[in-house]
Image (cartoon, helix red, strand yellow):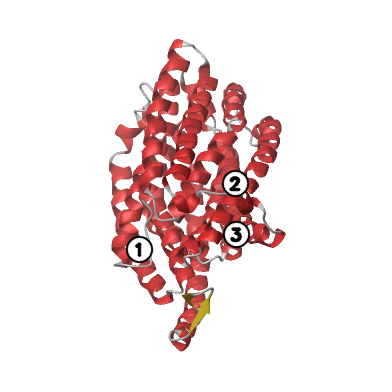
Amino acid sequence: MVRNLTKGRPLKQILYFALPVFIGNVFQQFYSMVDNIIVGNTLGENAFAGVGATTSLAFLIIGFVQGLTAGFAVKTSQFYGANDVEKIKSSVAVSILLSGALTVALTVISVFTAMPILKLMRTPNEIINYSHQYITVVFVGLGATMLYNLCASILRALGDSKVPLLFLVMASVINIGLDLLFIMVFHMGVAGAGWATVISQFISGAACMVYMFKKYEILRLSSRHFKLSFKFCMQHLAVGLPMAFQYSIIAVGIMVQQAALNAFGTLYVSAYTAASKIDSIFTQSLVAMGSAVATYVGQNYGAGEIERINKGVNQAMLVSVALAVVGGLIVFFGSDIMTALFVKNPDREMLSLSKRYLFWQGVFYIGLAVIYVYRNALQGMGYSLLTTIGGVVELGMRIIASILLVKVLDYLGLCLSNPCAWIGVDVLYLIGYYVIMHGKTKRYFALKNVRIVDKGRTVAQKI
């Protein structure tokens, strides 16, 4: 059901929204892990490393999709907070049109540039063919990824985080079954793992789309909603593209990091792949809090509830710190057991490398929590340019650390590259948020009793 986040206790509303997102994100990571576990245990360490070596390249494109659809949904959530039904429908329509056009362009570009980029990243010769086979399938099916992320983002913009979860769980179950079928029965190799992911995402996205249009009157569109002005399209692109580029900018930094890692050899790639999958599971609580904050802030910003935004963000940050501490402890003490899931009989050196990486990530999870809360708060208010600048800062810090620290500290330098990037961008987001909110809070108290009438409805004056 749709949920109005402009009423009720802020923290309760945020947590209520975040919990389904967290479960959904874990399932999404889970079926990605299933690909890796099945590949690692059936096709061998080289195939496992080959799939793992595509992580940063996949994030470059898929992250763009996620940022784009999340950015479009920011506008939808603001219109929902302002209770403007026609603008909500027009926002959904423009999101569909723009997403469709960009999907075609992204698919063509990503498929034809995959191999050159893998070579540029110095992917080891013994695994590069595995990497190319897998990532090509994922990119061919990019439309399925766009479909699910767009539908899920629209529903979350209206406060419904449960339905995207249900369809994601369905996709996870289908993905596991198809993995086993394609790899173990049809012997399709790493390409089978890619097709399992694409098909399961398409089924999930199509089901989500049918549900949302059938269930919610507020999302049912007519031809007039697709007659959009250039200005309205640009308003969505002005939020969506910076968020998309922000994700991709971060991905470029991770690709530089991956290139530095590839130079260490296949053993290091395997250890890093396993560790990063574990890391991604235990940071999903922070991702979910960020997603909840973005929708919460977007709706309240549309409603002009500035003080409510401040209260909710502060409370979300406290919860995120607690989650960061717990996650850090779990990844460190459970690293050996979890790493052993990915590869049969991992040697002691691989376990040591994985544990070393997870230790340094866990120590700095609080810095990552700051990013997710304040970056999403700024995005919810529409300050996507500032968050894009943050992405550039993060890119710079990660590249510097990956190049300089690796030369000085070897593998430890690679382990520290993420924390360096997190700390650098934390400073920007904290200063930016508090400067912006200080000005808005002063204007809020000056204008809080002022109301204007728009088409017979009383709405808060734009803060």
Q: Which residue is mark 2?
A: 96
**Residue tagged by mark 3?**
239
* Any part of residue 303 in sight: yes
Q: Which residue is more in the foreground, 97 or 245?
A: 97
Numbered circle sitting on residue 316: 1
Q: On the image, which quarter does residue 355 sit in?
A: top left
Q: Earlier in the sequence, mark 1 or mark 3?
A: 3
Q: Residues within 10 Å of mark 1 (few under 14, many from 20)?
A: many
Q: In the image, what residue type sits under mark 2? A: Ile
Q: Nearer the viewer, mark 2 or mark 3?
A: 2
2 or 1: tag closer to the N-terminus: 2
At label 3, the amino acid type is Val
Q: CA distance from mark 2 to mark 1?
A: 31 Å
Return the residue nearer the eye: 63 or 354: 63
Q: Residue at x 43, y 49 (%)?
A: 216
Front tag of 1 and 3: 3
Viewer-closest of 23 and 79 = 79
Q: Classify mark 2: helix, strand or loop.
A: helix
